[in-house]
Amino acid sequence: MSLELAVAAALFVGVIAYAVLGGADFGSGFFDLTAGNSSRGAELRTLVDHSIGPVWEANHVWLIYVLVIWWTGFPESFAAAMSTLVLPLLFALLGIVLRGASFAFRKYAATLAQARLFGIVFATSSIITPFFLGTVAGGIASGRVPLDGTGERWSSWVNPTSLFGGAIAVGTCAFLAGVFLVADARRSGQERLADELRVRALAVGAVTGVVVFAALVPIDRDAPTLAAGLEGRAAPLVALAALAGAATIALLWTRRYAVARVTAVLAVAAVVSGWGVGQYPWLLVDEVTITDAAGATATLQGLLVAVGLAVVVVVPPLAYLFRLTQSEEWSRPGH
Amino acid sequence: MLAPDVVTALTHLAAEAEPAGLLPARQQMALSLGWHIVLACFGVAFPAMIFAMHLIGIRRKDPVALELAKRWAKVSAVLFAIGAVSGTVLSFEMGLLWPGLMGTYGDVLGLPFAFEGLAFFLEAIFLGIYLYGWGRMPPKRHVLMVLPMAVTGVVGAYCVLAVNAWMNAPTGFRIVDGAVTDVQPWAVLFNLQTFVQFAHMWVGAYMLAGFTIAGVYAVGMLRGRRDAHHRLGFLVPFVFASIAAVTQPFVGHVLGFGLDERQPAKLAAFELAETTESPSPLRLGGILVDGEVKYSIDIPYLGSLIAMNSPDEPVPGLDTIPEEDHPPVNLTHLAFQTMVGIGTLLAAAVVWFWFQRRRGRDLLERRWFLRFAAAAGPLAVIALEAGWIATEVGRQPWIVYGVMRTPEAVGDYSASLWWLLGISTVVYTAMTVGAVVVLRSMARRWRAGDADLPSPYAPEVPAGEHG
């Protein structure tokens, strides 16, 4: 593997991690928003709080990781994407700011009225953010981001691939969140809530599956380079996404929630990797390849040192945090 | 018909005219950075104070200290959340507003950001563990979970300062025929300039967070809440802030060494040196009007002594620097002196406090001192903001000193970028109001005796109604 490719792979691991871990946090906003009025939704909202509270900031850092590796490893393409896709990026950024702030505010809100206000902001922005990030992916994947940064400011992200990208992002986030929340509800002994969530997770899963595969039709015309990749090199990943998605539905159906989490993660990771492998070797599709976009060699080596260090110093505590949140003591309500 | 010289003048003007997006982009950056920097200070300094308080609680089996640590952890959860998102804003803005900088120098300045990302990662992970670990982990292990946050906050600050130091004193690359080559990213991360600049900010962060937190308890004491809780809540952050405040003048002075060679225009603006005078006076206050210094109080010799470490070596004046390389002089000068003035005041005040305490006099019994202590937090914020204004505005018109001018770095935006600034102002105001409302309500409920602050997601059910 060349140096450039190794850095790009490290970058893309970050994209997948953000899509899965950050995605599950964003997706919980969908369930929060649709939980019903304050008396009916209180239990679910408390569960959402409890599930993503300890982890959302850590999961959010994957986005920072992606941005930093991108601008350090492939600076010109980063500047180009930022310039062309400024609008969806700003909308996503607004969503990120509102989501994080209002989530923290809601947890310590004094009154129901305040909690409701912050809750609506939190839940709505949790849906908006992945949508716009999805349109960004679509703009890059459909070859609408020229390297000189002079792409169209609107049509670069208001186009079939981008809109489906946005819908897929929202759908996969909600799908992951649904599966994780069902499992969390059962672990804390809230069987009734788990049953309620199960039905909705099944519905979200079915809709998302349809959207993901329906997207292949417009992508074929709108993003031929990506389509060729999806039909070729990335075809196994597309198949894996379908299989893992179907398996998740089956596992939810049969109430095997713990295992369903694994297949759900696999399905979403396969969808996201399908995009990445599908557009390989392009970094900005039809504009610049990974190799040509790479920055200075010494910097790429430095980045790999940073990534290596991350594996050593970040992954163990991250695993510890996840293990704690899944443990018996941490599943107790309260706090 | 236009005379030829008018035409030449107009073309010249057009070439000189700033891109329409430059001013709004700079204001946008100033707003988002100025807002984030306050929270970043808490991210750097608060964990160490929480650790100290928590440790006191465990060592002395002191319930007051434990309760304080627990509350501070909850406060830090709110502050870190808005700090994390406002920090993300900056990551986006680096590319959105300054594609010329990032596209050209991304691989030169980027590596420190990668390590900053790692530090932030660890900080977020341990925040989650520490915050939710209360009562769920063995206490002795639990208290250690805040320690990595104290370390990573420092590492993260160092990395960010490395980038800023690089913008002031670019290193680690060469320009050959207009192309950036021979990139040495490690040289950007590790150099003396970075270290000194970091030290200045690090100490400043402890001042800001320490004085602000102590100030909260000073206000409580002013309102008559003179219990062990308030005394301890005041003293622990005040000790941190005191050490920082007496160290800061020295660190700041060391940072100034050689500024006459690194960035002569910035130094001239700091010192309001229009002409080169030997020896240079220290100019307190004053502004430059039409190239003349007005309304300043000049103290002879002191300018040379402080800025140049010499009795007669002059501060090089602005007249030695081409006009097009001058920063906005008045703003730089006044911001710099605001920082130095407040820093000196705070240092003197803490020395006085501890001196009196040694002599057995407790200034916490004096209302005037408590009022001053309550104001010290906002003063430290103003000093820190002023310091950043001084160094950033003083570097203009360069974004990378001597290498890239700010207009070359800014994105291709029209004046509609002002809209972004308008929206951002609204969002940041709302976020500030939200944080204040929530933090005050937490304090109110704690005073009323609530401990856990349960989430109020459902309407309260009157007791007995549902059996």
Image (cartoon, coloured by chain):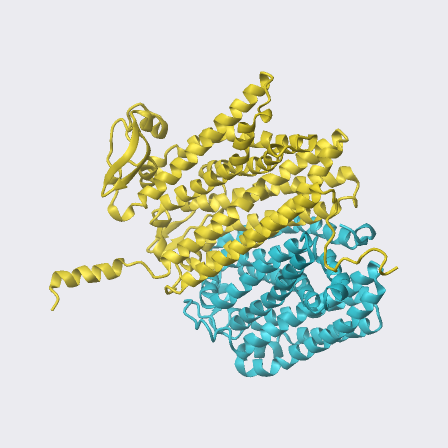
Chain colours: A cyan, B yellow
Q: Residue at x 42, y 32 (%)?
A: B341
Q: Is residue B13 left or right of residue B366?
A: left
The percent coordinates of residue A97 (x first, y second) are 57, 58
Examine the rendering and report whether any part of residue A37 can be seen.
yes
Quarter of the image where one finds residue A2:
bottom right
Relative to B19, A248 lies left or right? right
Q: Nearer the viewer, residue B46 or A73?
A: B46
Question: In the rendering, at what x and y percent does residue B367 appear?
Answer: 56, 28
> On screen, B356 above or below B99?
above
When the figure is inspected, residue B381 is found, relative to residue A229, above or below; the finding is: above
Q: Is residue B307 left or right of residue B250?
A: left
Q: Position of residue A122 (x, y in %)?
A: 63, 61
Q: Farthest residue in the right direction?
A: B467
If the image is split into quadrants, where does the N terminus of chain A sit? bottom right
Residue at image position (47%, 36%) is: B196
Which residue is located at x 46 percent, y 52 percent? B31
Q: How many numbered marks are there?
A: 0
| Front one among A254 and B59 | B59
Percent x, y for residue A184? 78, 61
